[in-house]
Image: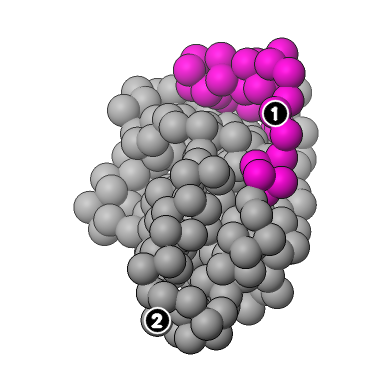
């Protein structure tokens, strides 16, 4: 017998910076009688705001978006609305996105080539708290559990690199950092390169987010 809580349609919020992706998802999901697409968002900031307004049961969350990425948006939505279930729907399988997304509170992690029927199954399962993980994601998470933990990446930074990271997280340019630390701009570039390498990050934005999340810089 279907419970009263599950008798109403599943309220879904679509989050993706590509309009054509949102349009395609909406067109398919609206064919399902038990799924109600209540809104869309084009980036993480809008997703957080729309989740507060619309109170969806499930959020389909892209990861790579402007203004605020999907990992940060997932974390904030889960803080505001712990009962909202988030399904990551992305094209990326790298560890720098998989593990943080799950740690941020995502219920499921799927790739955009997922079969439509499997996506619908994941949405229905998400409301019941059931996780749906791409097989490679499951393998990597298992590897994280079974592999001996390496020292915290941030511990590998020198004190000067930590200073540079703090200033970088404040939005300072290389020239401004150089002026603040009384060193050359070339030296700062070298420090930034070392920071990204040691932390396994791709760009300054990821470094700034890392600094905030690990208490190396104040939140904006």
* Residue drawn 35% across the image and 23% down it: 115
Magenta stretch containing residue 133, yes or no? Answer: yes
Label 2, secondary structure: give it. Answer: helix
Give, as a single range, the part of the protein colored magenta.
128-156
Label 1, secondary structure: give it. Answer: loop
Residue 40 image position (x, y, % from top left): 42, 61
Within 10 angstroms of label 1, few (less than 14), some, or many (20 or more) residues? few
Quadrant in the picture for residue 18: bottom left
Q: Earlier in the sequence, mark 2 or mark 1?
A: 1
Residue 169 visible in this rendered orientation of the protein: no
* Residue drawn 35% across the image and 36% down it: 91
Q: Name the residue under label 2.
A: 175
Q: Which of 151 and 79 is in front in this view?
A: 151
Q: Quadrant of the C terminus?
A: bottom right
- Name the outermost residue toward the left: 20
Within 10 angstroms of label 2, few (less than 14), some, or many (20 or more) residues? some
Residue 118 visible in this rendered orientation of the protein: yes
Q: Which of 43 and 13 is in front in this view?
A: 43
The relative height of residue 149 versus residue 87 in the rendered view (above or below) is: above
Would residue 101 be found to the left or right of residue 30 on screen?
right
Magenta stretch containing residue 57, yes or no? Answer: no
Quadrant in the picture for residue 125: top right
Residue 170 image position (x, y, % from top left): 57, 78
* Residue drawn 68% across the image and 61% down it: 159
Q: Mark 1 points at which residue?
A: 150
């Amino acid at each position: 017998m279907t419970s009263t809580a599950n008798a109403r349609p599943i309220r879904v919020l679509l989050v993706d910076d590509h309009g054509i992706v949102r349009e395609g998802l909406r067109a398919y999901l609206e064919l399902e009688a038990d799924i109600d697409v209540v809104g869309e968002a084009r980036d993480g900031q809008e997703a957080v705001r729309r989740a507060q307004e619309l109170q969806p049961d499930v959020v389909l969350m892209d990861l790579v978006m402007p203004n605020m990425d999907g990992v940060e948006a997932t974390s904030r939505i889960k803080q505001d609305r712990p009962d909202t279930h988030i399904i990551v729907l992305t094209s990326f399988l790298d560890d720098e996105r998989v593990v943080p997304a799950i740690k941020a509170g995502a219920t499921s992690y799927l790739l955009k080539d997922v079969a439509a029927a499997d996506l619908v199954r994941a949405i229905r399962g998400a409301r019941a708290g059931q996780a749906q993980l791409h097989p490679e994601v499951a393998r990597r998470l298992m590897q994280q559990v079974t592999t001996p933990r390496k020292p915290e990446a941030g511990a590998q930074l020198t004190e000067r690199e930590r200073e540079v990271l703090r200033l970088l997280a404040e939005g300072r340019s290389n020239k401004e950092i150089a002026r603040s630390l009384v060193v050359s701009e070339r030296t700062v570039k070298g420090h930034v390169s070392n920071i990204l390498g040691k932390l396994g990050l791709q760009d300054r934005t990821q470094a700034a987010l890392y600094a905030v999340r690990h208490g190396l810089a104040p939140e904006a």
